[in-house]
Amino acid sequence: MNKSYVIGLDIGTTSAKSVLFDRNGSVVSEHEVEYTLSHPFPGWVEQDPIAIELGAINAIKYSIQKGNIDPNELLAVGISSAMHSIICIDRDLQPLSPSITWADGRSFQQAENLMKENGTDIYLKTGTPIHPMSPFVKLLWMKETGYEPYKKAFKFVSIKEFLLGRWFNQLVVDYSVASATGLFDIHKLDWDEQALQIVGISYEQLPTPVRPTHILEGISSRVCEEMGIPATTPFVVGGSDGPLANLGIGAITPEDIAITIGTSGAIRKMASQPKTDAKQEVFCYAFDKDLWVTGGPTNNGGIVFRWLREVLGQQEVSESLTIGKDAYDLLTELASHVNPGANGLIYLPFLNGERAPHWDANAKGAYIGLSASHEKSHLIRSGLEGVIFNIYQIGETLERLTGSSNRLLASGGFARSSLWLQILADIFGKKVEVPLSHQSSAWGASWTALYALNEVPSFQAIKDYIPMQDTYLPIEANHLIYQELYPIFKNLYQSLKPSFHAISEFQRKN
Ligand code: ADP
């Protein structure tokens, strides 16, 4: 039988999503299963790995049912997963601990201490900024606090290895998930002995690193029956959601930059060499033996607009209910009547502290430049601009490290707004393209599976299989305005940093 379909399984932080594609990248069906996050203590963010396993199995099962295809026509399953999770497991691949997610901040003190000691040396080798998100830093917390599951662990894995280990009885980790642990030397493509020593674990306690095209066969009969797929279906290990989103959107050479703004945001570029420098502003993760992804995550993407909608958009929210239009669209419509630069009103978007480019949990949001002439519309526009200025600042570092680019490929919830996309084109002074499909990571995982099985000639060939929906060209006059405002924006964080830290201190006490 000429098999026609491939699944991209995307194991995210809030849900597992299975997307069934045909060979051309058209979505046939998809199914998403949500799971919960728990917060046993302030700043802790954990998940039940067994619930995620069940979610992933059901996502695959129901995407096939919804697609109404013969499961024998399924060529392969490729896998994408969120980065930085860590689970302590025993010999029988049972969890000894919950999955501790990227958002868990319990190890902030260890991160601070590492930065004063050998953090920069480790970062230069591993490409993972020293931050509580990193499993490296979490393992140090486990060691220093005598965490019981750490003491008993047979191995330490992320959620993807946990699932694949239980399904195929093989503990392998793809290069990009390995990179995101902060324990992996992205130059040598192997675990870093110094990092392992610091956290007190052995090489044998980690899974074996493999290329993203590594094929797993021989799924357990329990799992394939539950999924409703033939036992012969190959799974391809794939990567983490960041590099796979770049692949799935076609940003796989340094000429293209991928920008995703959902609740949070990220800007990433792929290059044929690893790039880090002592400033530690960006991450660099290996994807394959000759492909690395460099970029920066921001905590303050679409969540900023959601906050604006909540505090300033009550009228639009109630209007949206009566006229059946999205409140975000009503607010962007309002902001579109304001000049670029919002008459000199600048917004620092750090509502949730910030990762790239400042890596400062105490950073705060701020409107600067307010005058009596500013109205709600200016506050909205300036908010949207502030999110993009911040991403532009990360982009500056990326271009410094990896050379300049001429095209931006945009995805995520923000891409529903033509105003926000135009602001992106104008601030960067570059062309923006938006793909038709929003399932970039899942398509990247599926393409990796097709490549592993020799069904397509290369990673690069994916560019012909990503239909674009819209293009935005920069407007020169607007770009000039933003170029004038950008240095002011950039200086503001540095000037306000001491005040932000003092305010944080105050907020912690009150
Ligand atoms: P997630 O990261 O949770 O998957 P999405 O990619 O759906 O989220 O992005 C959600 C964000 O997208 C919202 O917080 C909002 O800022 C933005 N958004 C959603 N709809 C619109 C719209 N019509 N116009 C502008 N922004 C929007």
Image: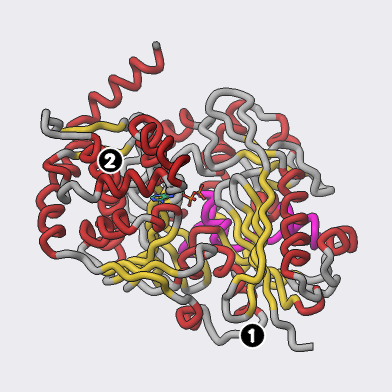
Q: Does dot 2 land on a helix, a strand or a loop?
A: helix
Query: Considering the image in quadrants, where does the C terminus appear?
Result: top left
Residue drawn 64% across the image and 32% down it: 38
Question: In the rendered structure, does residue 185 fall within the stretch colored magenta?
Answer: yes
Residue 31 in the image: state x and y as whole percent: 68, 58
Residue 292 in the image: state x and y as whole percent: 45, 66
As shown in the figure, which amino acid type bears the numbered disc 1?
Asn
Position of 268 with respect to 42 (left or right) is left
Position of 340 with respect to 280 (left or right) is left
Q: State which tag comes first along the sequence, 2 or 1.
A: 2
Residue 102 falls in image quadrant: top right
Residue 457 in the image: state x and y as whole percent: 55, 87
Residue 374 falls in image quadrant: top left
Q: Are marks 2 and 1 in contact (CB under 8 Å)?
A: no
Residue 115 seen anywhere in this rendered image of the structure: no
Position of 54 with respect to 375 (left or right) is right
Figure check: 34 above or below 494: below
Position of 488 with respect to 33 (left or right) is left
Q: Nearer the viewer, residue 490 or 326?
A: 326
Residue 151 in the image: state x and y as whole percent: 71, 34
Magenta segment: 162-190
Label 2 CA crowd tier, 10 Å (few <14, some 14–19, many 20+):
many
Residue drawn 85% across the image and 70% down it: 231
